[in-house]
Image: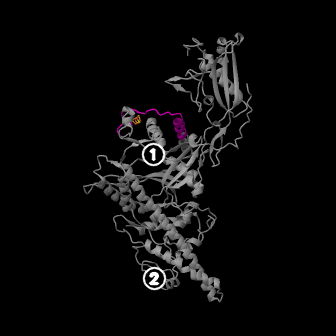
Amino acid sequence: MKIAFGPFKDVEPTEDELRPMTDRLGVQIVRDGVPVHIFGVHHRTQRFLDVFDPLKGFAVEVTSEMGKIELPDPDTYVDDGNGGQRMAIQPTVLFKAFLRDPEQRLIATAEFLKIINSASSFSEGHSQVRGKLYEALGLPGSTLGEDAPRGEQKQAPAPVVGNAHVNGVSAISTPAEGSRNKLPAEAQALLEQAKQAGAQAATAQAQSDAQVVTEAKEATGDGSDTAAFEVAEAPKADETALTVAKQSRSNAAPAKSGKGTAKDPATPATTDATNEAVDQGGSAKVDVTAASEAEVVVDGTPTQAPTPTVASAVPAAIQGVPSAPKAANGEELNANLLRQARNRAQAKGVPVPDVFDSALHLRNFYKQLCTNTQASAAA
Amino acid sequence: MTTAVVSQASVASVRPPVSAEYDVYLSHSSSTLMEKCGAAYAYRYRDRLESVTSSVNLGFGSAFDQAVSAFVIADLYGLSVDVNAVFVNAYKEWAATRVVDFSTRWKGHDDILATGELLLSRFVEWWKASGLKVMVDLQGMPIVQRELRVRLPRNVIYSSILDLVVMTPDGEVVILDVKTPSQDSTELFALNSGQLTGQQLVLDAHKESLGITSIDKVGFLNAVKRPVPQKKDAEGPVVAPMHLVPARTPEQVEEYVQSRLWIADDIRRKRFARRSLDSYCTPCTTMCDFHLWCSKQIRDGLHVRPPRSRTA
Ligand code: SF4
């Protein structure tokens, strides 16, 4: 690097005055196949003073003032409030440098906006604006022809170390932002249908349970106005549940079980009591999600008529699941598997054991649910 | 000369960034495009250029995804769905709004619809026999077409859409990516695919909120798209045998994270060089949407996508 023009014509830094320029990760910067070197401010000051000698009246003046903008600091990371990290926003100081000749005429100026993030930032700013002034006069800070951005000489940040969760990786957790359903409209509609049916079935369930309680109370002479009111309110929701159930099984085969005389043969009866209720236009306890396997239409015709399931299995599925994921033998149960098994059992109307004997018992139970699916869902 | 009075900024009191200009948003496809060719990345994501025509493969894949999503949800809840109708509607809707680019193996839309119908029926059979069931999250919602986002170090936001998270009959949790390629991929690809690693990365970060205790396997479900054969014995479209491979190790995930950070650095530093590679493996073919623009500055066949708003 030999300077060809200007006040520093023919100046050529020695090897000792140059050092390799690296990027933030510590990798040497190469341009056009040639490694870039830094000609630091400290070394350039000596060359500068040879030309603009203060003893001959030349003067460099540096001023500073608070910067009007704050900047993100690539050297300081802070909590982003979302479990992740982001660059800190830091104050800045604007440094200005002026070169005056012996007659106090302004020869050159330079400015540098410095992020203030440590006690030494201020003096670094001073040096850097001097470097910019040298550059303005034709004494560049690197073989590239410009000052190296200070941050580029930093060491690489500590490597991310691995474990189950990779360090520094955080879920963007707000439901609206971090996790989004991209379900197509048809799938979304099915989901809504399932949710609605599930909720209504649950309501119907609760109300039917209330009715059972009321009847039990009445049987024991403990009836009350409140209980009667609950029963009177029940049919509305139950009717809706029934409608949904019918819709979702429009091609369903007649019920295989259930002793009553349900109005719609495709709608499984639950108990004698609920069949009576249907006959009377009253409450029917029907679990839609317990209905059947998926009824798949690939060519315009259903490939399989679903097998309706006796809905009385559902309360067992809902109520009979152990709350703590432990088996009777003390083994921990896989929470994923347990939730999946509950879901699957509910969809099929299969009761879930109150307590699983062991982790293996749960595994076999789930496998069985899947195997049953395979057999009964075969086209 | 004035003396600045500067106090050390408190990291606790720093204000949030004023805008997203410091964040780099990456997905599998954008980061892979940057890896493949910086110039192509810049044309697509910086300049927002895209081809005025759309490959039929895109429309097929998207319609197939929609039908599969509807089917697996119906399967989960015991509901009825006409998967073929979902496919046909989705494909027709897609095709109605753009100029579709057919490769020579397809004669037209009817060909595509016939393949879709046959492939879907084979998929349904395959799914039933597999015993796979879609996983539900803590809210009881099936994990289907779920977009998950994570913040990586150094202000990189990575997002991924998971086609399916399923459980095998043996209770293993599997990330399954549904593809409709024209030929099957190998197990080797499943073992190395960055897309699957990225999906594991985001699911792992969201494990707690979704109630997933472990991720055991990852893999592709390749529904191989071929024209419906004229001859009786020819195979036509099929669901290829599935290659499920063990979930990535933490080191593999970390390597992937680092590689995304390098890509983000390259984007910030505007390293958008052309990457022609060698003649036997060059991406500079007519398959590159930007080949004319890039090599001859001819803008024909390209238009600018409207800007998209960010929510994160
Ligand atoms: S033609 Fe080649 S170099 Fe140009 S954008 Fe496409 S892939 Fe990149």
Q: Which amino acid does the dot numbered 2 rest on?
A: Ala
- In the picture, measured across the screen, residue B243 lies left or right of residue A121, that is left
Label 2: which secondary element: loop
Q: Residues within 10 Å of mark 2 (few under 14, many from 20)?
A: many
**Which of the pair A76/B98 is nearer the observer?**
B98
Residue B37 among those drawn in magenta: no
Q: In which quarter of the image is residue A179?
A: bottom right
Q: Which residue lies furthest to the left in this view?
A: B231
Quadrant where the N terminus of chain B is found in the figure: top right
Q: Do labels 2 and 1 share a chain?
A: no
Q: In which quarter of the image is residue A331?
A: bottom right
What is the basis of the colouring in this image?
one colour
Q: In the image, which is nearer the foreground, mark 2 or mark 1? A: 1
The magenta span reads: B259-286
Q: Which residue is tagged 1?
A: B306
Q: Which amino acid does the dot numbered 1 rest on?
A: Pro
Percent position (x, y) of residue A328?
Answer: 62, 68
Count of labels in the image? 2
Picture residue at 32% right of the left edge, 52% below the top: B226
Instruction: Mark 1 and ligand 1: say if the CB distance to the nearest ligand atom is below 8 Å.
Output: no
Percent position (x, y) of residue B270?
Answer: 51, 34
Task: Say above or below: A332 vs B194.
Answer: below
Q: In the rendered image, is residue A353 in sight?
A: no
Query: Which quadrant of the picture is home to ligand 1?
Result: top left
Q: In the rendered image, is residue B50 in sight?
A: yes
Q: How crowded is mark 1: few (under 14 residues within 10 Å), some or many (20 or more)?
A: few
Task: Say above or below: A25 vs A216.
Answer: above
Q: Which residue is tagged 2?
A: A262
